[in-house]
Amino acid sequence: MVGLIEFGTTLILDWISQYGYWGIILLMALESATLPVPSEIVMPFAGFLVWEQGVMSLPGVILAGTIGCTLGSIAAYAVGYYAGRPLILRYGKYVLLSERHLVQAERWFARYGGKATLIARLLPIIRTVISLPAGISKMRFKPFVLYSFVGSLPWTALLAYVGFWLGPNWREIGSVFRGMDILVVVGAVALIIWYVHAVRKRSSKSEEPHA
């Protein structure tokens, strides 16, 4: 298993080195389409290449990653929209998509509506699955694309910047982000609490009797 992971990692790194921005777009699109391509390797290495070679720019790398995420999210949205839940559950196992992951994403979407596609982009695993229930529920396409783009931007920017900042020590990124998963979750929970509080406050004001 370790050898297989190392082989896949090498393929990803070689692809980015050879194809630059287009390689980043494709790999990040595959990840957001629920395929097992880790953004935690793709974007930091892209940031590292900016530091090492100076051929690509950091803003360009971040934009390419965000565009890739958005395109992959659209693909997953289309699968949910046209294939529906039964077909996803039937064939999801072939791309390592479990029913538990889908159910978790569906609960998020049921609770927060379309904005779940924005908030969930900051959470491990669910960030790539949230597009499926958006498609299944027939969420309006334009808001979905907007939320997917805006939600993907902080994640790709953070990963790319870490790769750029670590420079020659980029191989340590994997262990760093395994520890940072907790921080990401805590930050996302804080964001959700703030959002729910703001919505309730706005609702209470609108319900106040007018003189």
Image: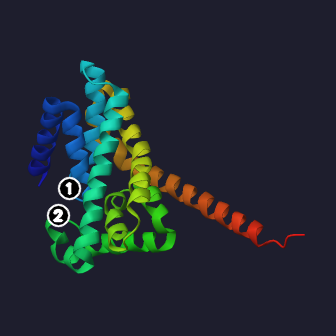
Q: Residue 90 at what x, y percent from top left? A: 17, 77
Name the foreground residue: 48 vs 116: 116
- Tell me the quadrant of the picture where the C terminus can be found: bottom right
What residue do we see at 31% from left, 58% from top? 128
Q: Does the rendering let one see residue 168?
A: no
Residue bearing the label numbered 1: 36
Which is more N-terminal, label 1 or label 2? 1
- Tell me the quadrant of the picture where the N terminus can be found: bottom left
Helix, strand or loop at label 2? It is helix
Residue 166, picture quadrant: top left
Say which amino acid is labelled 1.
Pro
What number of labels is visible? 2
Residue 107 left/right relative to 204:
left
Residue 32 left/right relative to 201:
left
Residue 176, picture quadrant: top left
Q: Residue 103 at what x, y percent from top left? A: 35, 75
Name the foreground residue: 157 vs 141: 141
Say which amino acid is labelled 2.
Val
Tag 2: Cα neighbours inside 10 Å, few (<14), some, or many (≥20)? few
Name the foreground residue: 168 vs 62: 62
Q: Are marks 2 and 1 in contact (CB under 8 Å)?
A: yes
Residue bearing the label numbered 2: 95
Extreme right residue here? 211
Residue 26 left/right relative to 114:
left
Q: CA distance from mark 2 to mark 1?
A: 7 Å
Helix, strand or loop at label 1? It is loop
What residue do we see at 41% from left, 39% from top? 158
